[in-house]
Image (spheres, rainbow, N blue to C red):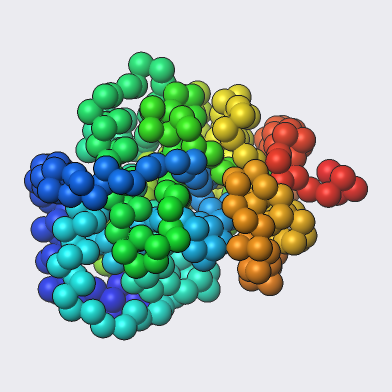
Amino acid sequence: MTFEDRYGWLDRLLHRTAFRVGTAQHALADVEAMMYEDTLADIAVENPVFITSLPRSGTTILLRLLWDSGHFASHTYQDMPFVLCPLFWDQYTGQFGGEATTRERAHGDGLQVSETSPEAFEEMIWKHFWPRHYQADRIRPWGPNDQNGEFDSFFEAHMRKIIAVRQEEESGRQRYVSKNNLNIARLAAPPSPMRDGTFLIPFRDPVQQAASMHRQHERFLKIHAEDDFVREYMEAIGHHEFGEGLKPINFDDWLADAPSPDGLDFWLHYWVAAYRHVLHHANESTVLVSYARLTGDPEWALARLAEVIDVPEDLLLSQSDRLEPPRTHSADEIALPKSLQQEADEVYRRLNQQAEIAPAPESR
């Protein structure tokens, strides 16, 4: 199903209106917080989980595993397009009901989504408070000087709102979870509301993950050329991973000498820069997850995951049959610089060594 099938002219008009009144959405969100003050006062944000990594590493399946445990509250597609005012929007859309429609997501990877599926919309808040980080062709990582008390208050209230909305649908959803790939750009200095949480960071074989990112970039270049609304939609929600709206995170200024994103070597350079950054800033709140172990030994991996994020084991183990090894992508490894492959292999080795959910000893 294409974006044209999913979003008719009226839906597009609504989304574009919501995207273009971002400041008004934030103002309305403040009003919402005051109106629901008593409701939100009874909700605690405890042990939130922030799933983050480069794309194509397993972040979506981790989000779905936690969401389907019934233990976590997350954004869902039904929060669009007024993502910053989930309580108001839920009251409005709740009047119309209707059954959720399942379709394959735009990535063409077989994952099915519906209005009730969890999704990554958190970045819209960051874009409002930190516009200077989103440059023309790149995103600048956050550092110790990037602190903002107004953001902290807003984000804390927003997490409470998401928990409140989801608890109305299912009372067991007591903890906030998000999938936001750009949160790896904030590991050096997480803002106050994130410091009591856990960062789940999955990783894959470097060449395979790079090849998957390269393939998605080419796919979205075509999609964006055919339908500009798709690019507008993705940029509005802070998805700058692929296509015409590509804005890589400039870890340690790696983009100064980067090759063109048309080639696989760009994506492998990106992989090395990103996961070096992850290793440098990993601490007790960081949980590295080997996607190879997660999909190759799901029962052990899910039991370990349940332990490290403090979730009843049975809520995850019951989903072990959903995990399958990712598809293998063809990659011209011979054309890749040998030194780059060696760098990637060394970073991958260190990730496996430090991972809480690591490959089996014999495969390290």
Residue projecting furthest to the top: 145
The percent position of residue 239, horizontal first and vertical second, equals 36, 50
The percent position of residue 317, horizontal first and vertical second, equals 68, 64
Asked whether 91 or 286 is in front, the reply is 91
Quarter of the rendering containing residue 337: top right
The percent position of residue 66, horizontal first and vertical second, equals 53, 58
- Does residue 286 appear anywhere in the picture? yes
Question: Is residue 103 positioned above or below 316 on the image?
Answer: below
**Image mark count:** 0
- Left or right side of 298 for 190: left
| Residue occupying image coordinates x 43% and y 34% | 194
Quarter of the rendering containing residue 234: bottom left
- Left or right side of 181 for 315: right
Residue projecting furthest to the right: 362
The quarter in which the N terminus is drawn is bottom left
The quarter in which the C terminus is drawn is top right
| Residue occupying image coordinates x 35% and y 57% | 75
The percent position of residue 69, horizontal first and vertical second, equals 54, 63
